[in-house]
Image: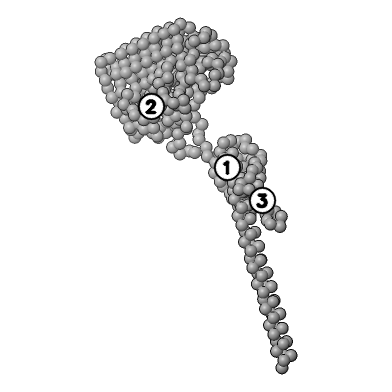
């Protein structure tokens, strides 16, 4: 009996030891699984960080992305490879953690991206095209003489200073009593002595620079421009789009005599500007005209502004950018003279002349020549990208089209 009891006790003791060992092994195995899972989570987070860096690189330059990226996220290294084939880029990101035993625990992400055009027409570029970003720009010679003043109206701290820059793709000539509060550049020679150019210039760069790269200026197709602004259906049936488009086929005269003030009511907004298309004849402004919203005047035979005229956006309270555009194609010139007070961004394909005591609040650009004399003053105002959509590339976006991880 005693031996049987002893054997039973020993058996229970051994069984208890076995259960204890098994329990410890189960607990240790569980802790090992938890530790492995935690390392996998860290590896995945690092791989995701690499993928996000790759996405930003594609957004910056989809056509020529970097071939590799690498880094460390929360102590875990990652490495990314990018392969562009046709219109797609395949991104493979691997984050690699190391467990307590020194074993590598990689986590893989593969993502495929495509660049697509935004055809909704609702996206407005962040800024106007380069050739519209100067106070004065000419493809041919730019001559400034007489009592010309080109000044900045956007004041504020240093981050908000605007330079009223001028540029010619042929030759820049300056003489007489001229004060340019900006830089003067030319793809050809610059003929200007000291004292003419006084830009906001914290870097100390030369106020004038010659033989710089030319600024590309597109050919202006008036009808094509209008079509892209309002759409084919509006151009085909203007009556159905009276809130967005007006077409005149034999010239327009605005303002009556110089003492008359008229207000052009329209529904033009920054997202959907109003377009006034003068298909035949010239647009002449001889009186005071106020334009409260966003409007683009497109005249195939040019513009003439003369007399004691105030033309432009005198009631607009939006951001510091032009809200009126005046554009003419290869058949037209733009003439501003007299005592006109003119608000807007201007483009003339043939030529541009400004004489007399004209005050321009905006910007001037031409594919031809610019001649400015007398006592005009040009107050540079940033051009609106909303009024230059047809000159800009269709905006694109990067879309994720395939994704897997393991």
* Comes first in the chain, label 1 or label 2: 1
* Comes first in the chain, label 1 or label 3: 1
Closest to the camera, between mark 1 and mark 3, is: 3
Read off the residue under disc 3. Answer: 96
Frontmost residue, 202 versus 120: 202
Between the residue at mark 2 and the residue at mark 3, the CA separation in whole angstroms equals 54 Å
| CB-based contact (under 8 Å), mark 2 and mark 3 | no
Q: Residue at x 68, y 69 (%)?
A: 25
Q: Under tag 2, what secondary structure?
A: loop
Residue 68 badge: none
Residue 55 badge: 1
**Residue 234 figure quarter:** top left
**Residue 250 figure quarter:** top left
Read off the residue under disc 2. Answer: 323
Q: Residue at x 48, y 7 (%)?
A: 175
Between the residue at mark 1 and the residue at mark 2, the CA separation in whole angstroms equals 35 Å
Frontmost residue, 231 versus 74: 74
Figure label count: 3
Closest to the camera, between mark 2 and mark 3, is: 3
Which quadrant does the N terminus fall into? bottom right
Vertical position of residue 297 compared to residue 85: above or below: above
Residue 204's spot in the image, x, y percent? 54, 19
Residue 22's spot in the image, x, y percent? 68, 73
Q: Residue at x 49, y 13 (%)?
A: 197
């Amino acid at each position: 009996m005693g031996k049987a009891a002893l054997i039973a006790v020993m058996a229970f003791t051994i069984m208890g030891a076995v259960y204890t060992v098994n329990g410890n092994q189960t607990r240790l195995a569980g802790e090992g699984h938890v530790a492995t899972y935690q390392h996998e989570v860290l590896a995945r987070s690092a791989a995701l960080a690499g993928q996000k860096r790759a996405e930003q690189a594609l957004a910056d330059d989809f056509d020529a992305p970097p071939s590799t990226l690498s880094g460390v996220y929360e102590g875990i290294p990652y490495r990314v490879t990018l392969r562009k084939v046709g219109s797609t880029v395949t991104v493979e990101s691997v984050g690699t953690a190391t467990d307590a035993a020194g074993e590598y625990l990689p986590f893989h992400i593969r993502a495929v991206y495509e660049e697509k055009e935004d055809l909704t027409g609702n996206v407005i570029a962040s800024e106007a095209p380069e050739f519209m970003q100067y106070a004065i720009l000419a493809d041919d010679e730019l001559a400034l003489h007489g009592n010309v003043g080109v000044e900045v109206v956007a004041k504020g701290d240093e981050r908000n200073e605007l330079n009223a820059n001028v540029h010619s793709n042929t030759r820049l000539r300056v003489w007489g009593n001229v004060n340019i509060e900006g830089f003067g550049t030319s793809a050809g020679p610059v003929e200007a002595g000291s004292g003419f150019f006084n830009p906001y210039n914290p870097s100390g760069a030369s106020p004038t620079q010659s033989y710089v790269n030319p600024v590309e200026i597109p050919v202006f197709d008036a009808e094509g421009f209008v079509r892209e602004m309002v759409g084919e259906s509006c151009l085909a049936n203007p009556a159905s789009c009276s809130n967005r488009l007006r077409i005149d086929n034999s010239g327009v005269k605005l303002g009556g005599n110089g003492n008359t003030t008229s207000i052009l009511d329209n529904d033009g907004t920054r997202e959907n500007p109003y377009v006034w298309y003068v298909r035949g004849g010239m647009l002449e402004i001889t009186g005071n005209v106020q334009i409260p919203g966003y409007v683009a005047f497109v005249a195939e035979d040019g513009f003439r502004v003369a007399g004691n005229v105030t033309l432009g956006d005198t009631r607009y309270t939006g951001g510091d950018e032009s809200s009126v555009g005046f554009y003419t194609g290869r058949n037209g010139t733009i003439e501003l003279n007299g005592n006109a007070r003119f608000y807007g961004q201007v483009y003339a394909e043939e030529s541009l002349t400004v004489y007399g005591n004209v005050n321009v609040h905006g910007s001037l650009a031409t594919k031809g020549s610019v001649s400015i004399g007398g006592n005009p003053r040009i107050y540079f105002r940033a051009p609106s990208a909303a009024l230059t959509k047809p000159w800009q590339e269709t905006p694109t976006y990067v879309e994720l089209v395939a994704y897997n991880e393991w």
